[in-house]
Amino acid sequence: MDSDKLSALPQAFLHRMEDMLEDDFEPFLAAYEQPRTYGLRVNTAKISCEEFEQIVPFEVKKIPWVSNGYFYNEDVRPSRCALYQAGLYYLQEPSAMTPASRIPVEPGEYVLDMCAAPGGKATAVGSALKGEGLLVANDISTTRARALLRNLELFGIPNLFVANEKPEKMVKNFPEFFHKIILDAPCSGEGMFRKEEALAEDWTPEKSEELSRIQKQLCLNAADMLQPGGQILYSTCTFAPCEDEQIISWLLRERPELSLISMEDYEGFSTGNPEWGDGNPQLKKCVRIFPHKMQGEGHFLALLQKEGTAGPSAGTSKTSRLAADIRKYMEEFFREIGLKTLDGQEFDWNRVEVRADKVYYLPSVSCNFRGLTFIRNGLYLGDLKKNRFEPAQPLALAFRKNEAEAVISLSVDDPRLERYLKGETLTIEPEEAAHSKGWHLLCVEGYPLGFGKLVNGTLKNKYPAGWRV
């Protein structure tokens, strides 16, 4: 958005921002004359930042307030790179990386992302779980929930439950269940006006007031599902106090068992303003991100903790009743591919479930999903065909580097990668493959992209049509 487009910003919005920012209003306006920034976040469950920097084929620059975030140039198309298709990074606006980076998720915890699509925050906390515990990622829109699932599958996250449900309905299934909850609330999107000009065209002051009612209800739902001692990260991409400080003020009054806690600071962050809420000085623990103070768009975030101490985990591991012949077919495939571990852990047959000839690897936590609309419970491993097991694409992406023996690894600049991602067959030299025939994982720089079957030096492409680039 350049200077001649400033006039497209709603006048009521500009008047309110001038009242809020006072002397900072002119620098704030000047930021709209600057180009937006572009970012990606590295999937550190698959690759370290150091190795990513060594193999990434385009220029990147570290984002200083997120340890695994990078800026990239506008003319780059990182979604076309094989490293992206291997789930090594997620494309995300730089300031939008902040909320998930400020909630301290530990492996083994139960985590809920209430409004998760398209998956920026869910993929971040899912990586932090390192395959342990449970990630419940929910979105009320079926279309958006399917896009969410695709991104979680790209990241190779096995311990997931992807729901397509109203949050108030989930409360009955998960009372005081989760250790950590992310609530990236539906908002008026004022912080994204520079990035998405259509948001400015649709904006009205009344929309913020209407959304604030929805945000309050979502906050109550989150509080009801949070364990004692657990934490909620509330975030929006708007500047409107009625959706930010005033929501937190209201929540602290409604739920006195909640209190604000400080987050890791950065020199470009601004504090929440108590005067924009109810005067509670604790609101200074909230964080505001303004485009004239950082290389990113507008955001608000608050981290709240529930008093008390968490009790024993409510979930229990599931015991499988897998038929002997099904296990035999799967073991034959695992021997052929040379499975060592999956997502860094020993494969647990008790977590395998078959539904309509589709095979899933369930989270180690068994919980009450009864009555909930969902599109995925666990990792989709593959399909049962006649007397054999056919692996699915999410299984390929759940493998980490060096977790399988039957691999064909190509360098990131190998033109055959582009052909593979289009679904074409490839010619493979004998020295490039682990074995002379059979199932292989095709990898980029050692990181799995998908499956193929080698026959007489030709790799038959098993990359699914719906995933092709």
Image (cartoon, rainbow, N blue to C red):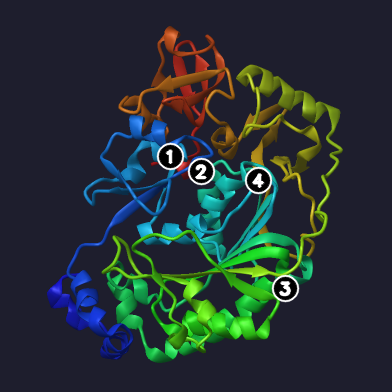
Q: Kindly give the residue lying farthest to the left in the view shown.
A: 4
Q: Quadrant of the N terminus?
A: bottom left
In front: label 2 or label 4: 4
Q: Give the class, few, some or many, for how many residues have Cα within 10 Å of label 4's Cα (few <14, many ≥20).
A: some
For label 3, the SS is: helix
Mark toward the start of the polypeptide (2 vs 4): 4
Q: Which residue is mark 2?
A: 154
Gap between marks 2 and 4 measured at Cα: 19 Å
Residue 2 at least partly seen = yes
Gap between marks 3 and 2 measured at Cα: 31 Å
Q: Could you tell whether 367 is left or right of 360 in the image? A: right
CB of mark 1 within 8 Å of CB of mark 2?
A: yes
User: Amino acid under label 2?
Assistant: Leu
Q: Could you tell whether 291 is left or right of 342 in the image? A: left
Q: Give me the disc on residue 392.
A: none
Gap between marks 3 and 1 measured at Cα: 37 Å
User: Amino acid under label 3?
Assistant: Asp
Mark toward the start of the polypeptide (1 vs 2): 1
Q: Nearer the viewer, residue 259 or 254?
A: 259
In front: label 3 or label 1: 3
Q: Give me the disc on residue 107.
A: 4
Q: From the viewer's perspective, is residue 107 above or below residue 420?
A: below
Instruction: Name the residue: 29% across, 60% down.
Output: 295
Q: Give me the disc on residue 224.
A: 3
Q: Nearer the viewer, residue 387 or 437?
A: 437
In front: label 1 or label 4: 4
For label 2, the SS is: helix
Q: Which residue is mark 1?
A: 85
